[in-house]
Amino acid sequence: MDELRFCVLGRMLGERGGVPVVLGSPQQRAVLAVLLLTPGHTASTSDLIDALWPDDPPSHARTTVRTYVWRLRRSLAVGAEPVDQTEGRLSSVPGGYHLDVPTGCVDALRAERLVAEAGGASAGGAPERARALLGEALALWQGEPLVGIPGPFAARQRSRLGDLRLTLLEERVALDIALGRAALCVSELTALTQEFPLRERFHELLMRALCQAGRQTEALEVFRSARRLLVRELGVEPGRDLAALHGRILDGDPELTGRAPAVRPGGGSGAPTGPGEPEPTPDPERPDALPRPAQLPPDDADFTGREAAVEALCAALTAAAPGRDALRIGAVAGMGGVGKTALAVHVAHRVKEHFPAGQLYADLRGDGGPVTPEAVLTAFLRALGTAPEALPDGLAAKSALFRSLTDGRRLLVVLDNAVDSAQIRPLLPGAAGCAVLVTSRAWLAGLPGARQIGLTVFAPQEAQDLLERMIGAERLAGESAAALELVTACGFLPLAVRIVAARLAARPSWTVRVMVDRLSDERRRLDELRVGDLAVQATFELGYRQLTPYQVRAFRLVAAVDCKDLGTAAAAALLGLDEHIADELLESLADVAMLESPAAGRYRSHELLRAFARRKSEAGHPADTVAGRTRLLEFQLATACAAFEQVVPGDPIRDALDLRAPGPAFAGPEAARSWAAQETDSLLSLATQVATAVAGRPPGEQQATEELHAAVGLLIALTPFNRGAWQGQWAAARALLQAAERRADRWAEGRARFLCGNAALAAARLDEAEQLTRSAAQACRETGDTVILRQSLNDLGMMAQYRGHYDEAARCYDEAILLARALGHETGESATVFNAAVAWVRSGQPDRAVRACLGELDKPRLRTAGAGRAQALYVLGFSLHASQRYDEAAERLSEALALWTGLDQTGWVAATRYRLADTLRALGRAEEALPLARAAVEACQEGRSERESGQALMVLGRVLSALGRRAEALDCVERAHGLFARLGLPEERTAAAQLAAGEPDLSAY
């Protein structure tokens, strides 16, 4: 993949492999500039708001920032890569965002790295290399940095980077003079003194260059001109360096006419002591010697995984940032029990040799009664040798003394379990040689320059590795599957894994499976996750107690619903709040790691936090939980109905569902499909949860009846989006059917039976599908549910057609068409006509099928591109093929394939491909047909559609036979025969006959 590169030293640009990247509006570029130039490429939402609106941000500021971030993710995506897969580049972290981009891919950071290398080269006695590196850095400037980018952050960076360029010019010219090239520098310096007349260093360098070139008189005139200017403009005399140089010229200093020693960029005479060099050890005999504290807790002998986080933090604490000489800070944020303290202590032990002055440690108790900064400073000052009577009064005085005592020393400070940035700031040393490592549940957005790590749960292998280290590999032998189940039940939370490992270690007779079984009941799981003084529930309780009442309610309600995650709009419905208020509330929970935000505008609970929250809800808030779930269900039903209407226009679904909430307006079918793809899994889980909840409630309870009907309606509204994904619909529909039967709700039972039959039909389980759908039709006739009766009859027709019972199929289709017309259901009528057309083809009436399809295509509704027209063209192409009108068939099928591809309907794309491949084969274009047939087989198998896989294999067999590849062709027919036999389809006999004949039947279709 080509690497992204960004330019900020001039007009802000981005490119990948020489191709420009669209960066959007100036405000959007301002957001990107913050992420590119903030140390660690991480910025809080507040930082981004401040970067755009310093004084009075608008009420929609957070929403606007999220929009800019979403657009940037889309711009940074590779080719057709979905936006939601670019989280690795621009990812959401608690409280803000992190941009994953190497330092060398941003020109300003590359320039700073070159400056650091130049300093090393100069200090190492390589002035020529130092000069070349500075020249390379200066060449990166293409004009005023961040030109046209608004906001105070960009203004500060323009000033900083502009000043950096002038400093580099000074150091590069100083090296040129030191290398004996003074005469070549005079004209450049003359121009620079005119452009920047108040910058004394340029005057000083010009005087040096003139002296080295033997032009002392001109050098003295440069001083006189500079002095007049400074007195006139600023009312000050020249600085000490410029005045001293003037005096040396008057004294005739011979060094000024020869080669001067090399100058190190930065103006200093030496480099600071590196991490590998010893710091002067305090002399214990001296009364002013400072003790060397060593307060780190012991490292965890079982510490496992976290390689990337360890390396990132070690680098942040020990590696000097290019062009910066400041305190180094590493910060770790994450939920309780995720292993923040273990990681921090491990990293501290890894890097402590870089800090010979010692290590200070404090538990700030941010999850309980927090320790005051003054109390921590008192302990630190005492550890550094300050006598009790010498301790000053007040936080500010203690903080100042702490900074004084740590100045010039290399000391590591570990601040564990912090509340927020305000608690930490007084505890920060001022010396660049020191480093600070902080842990906190909340993302510490107020620590400038910190390298922040958002710590998540273990990867599955890391969790199993910890289990193995604690109980031994021999205990896991033969139980690898159970081990994975165990750590999965722990939610991969390090504390939970450690607890179950400790329990297993204490009970040598227990197998891993025993522990898995003990955790299988979610309601008892938290009770099992405790050993000694370790308990997951106690850890969660500490964070829970710090929430506001509004946060507590949101935390409980989000965890109360069985949804993989929730979008902002759905969460707002659940909470009964305005969408913007809900978003702020959920963001605040994500900031303190009580919720996860896997993507912008999406929220979820960790499995164990969900169990904890549900226990809280059951203890005192059951009515609020039911009310929230009902609001969410009604909102999602209305949304699913709106999506259904986009992809099946003209369907009377709105009249068939009891909608109690307004649904959103989708921009078009693609937006509806995108919503369904993201939400379907969560919606099926929600429907299943409702079924379980209402099944045991009294049959006459109205609230339970309404919830059950809404859940059934939700699944009906999702049916257009479940092609090829019948398993989820089957499980949820079965749960709803059982609930309807227990409640003796015949109306809901009929609809649930239809949904089960529809899923069984998609799986080609014809016997089960027919039984369920016939009973659904009977229930619908009894309750007068004509909408679902029509669909049930259509499905019964398809089942009869699959079995080769074409007369029975026609009867079902005829009644379904009459019901569709009575309901004004144009889309349903067309769909059934197309199904009937396929039956007519199979019964030897292809011309009748062609006429029916052409009649439907002539309707205004099907003259525009869409799913209805694509289906009509598909069936027409199939019918024309059966009529041996192959050229027309290929034309219609090609048009259908283009439409289905544009609609991203993978199942229909696969079916159209194999139909088109068969037609091309009949036209003598088998080579052209082969890739289409192969692609169709692969897609059908990926979609787990066995009947369609069999049909595609039969077509591929005919194509291979036409190419003379008989053995491969028969292999395809044999595979298809196995599928048809397993499904009990009549095509089994056709495939068997062709296998007996020893070749595919090229006349088949």
Image: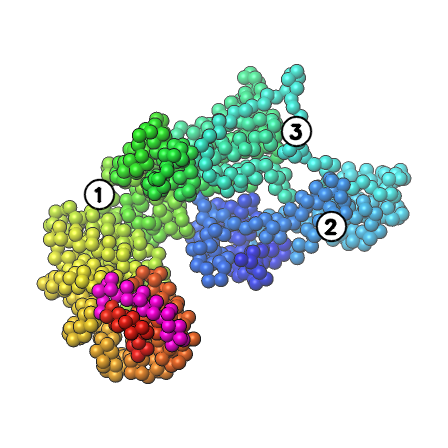
Residue 200 drawn at (x, y percent) = 76, 44
Q: Is residue 972 magenta?
A: yes
Which residue is outermost to the left? Answer: 782
**Distance between mark 1 and mark 3 Cα atoms:** 66 Å
**Residue depicted at x 33% and y 29%:** 508
According to the picture, the residue beneath numbered tag 1 turns out to be: 623
Element type at mark 2: helix
Element type at mark 3: loop
Would residue 811 be found to the left or right of residue 451 on screen?
left
Element type at mark 1: helix
Q: Amino acid at mark 1?
A: Ala
Q: Which residues lie in the magenta part?
A: 960-986
The front one of 820 and 585 is 820
**Crowd rating for badge 1 (residues with CA inside 10 Å; few <14, some 14–19, many 20+):** few
According to the picture, the residue beneath numbered tag 3 turns out to be: 278
The front one of 302 and 700 is 302
Q: Amino acid at mark 2?
A: Ala
- The quadrant holding residue 389 is top right
Residue 358 drawn at (x, y percent) = 58, 26
Q: Is residue 63 magenta?
A: no
Q: Amino acid at mark 3?
A: Pro
Disc 1 or disc 3, which is closer to the eye?
Answer: 3
Would residue 50 be found to the left or right of residue 798 on screen?
right
Residue 516 drawn at (x, y percent) = 30, 38
Would residue 211 be found to the left or right of residue 363 on screen?
right
Mark found first going from the N terminus, 1 or 3: 3
According to the picture, the residue beneath numbered tag 2 turns out to be: 132
The front one of 260 and 447 is 260
**Crowd rating for badge 2 (residues with CA inside 10 Å; few <14, some 14–19, many 20+):** some
- Confirm or deny contact between disc 1 and disc 3 (CB under 8 A): no
- Confirm or deny contact between disc 3 and disc 2 (CB under 8 A): no
**Residue depicted at x 65% and y 28%:** 279
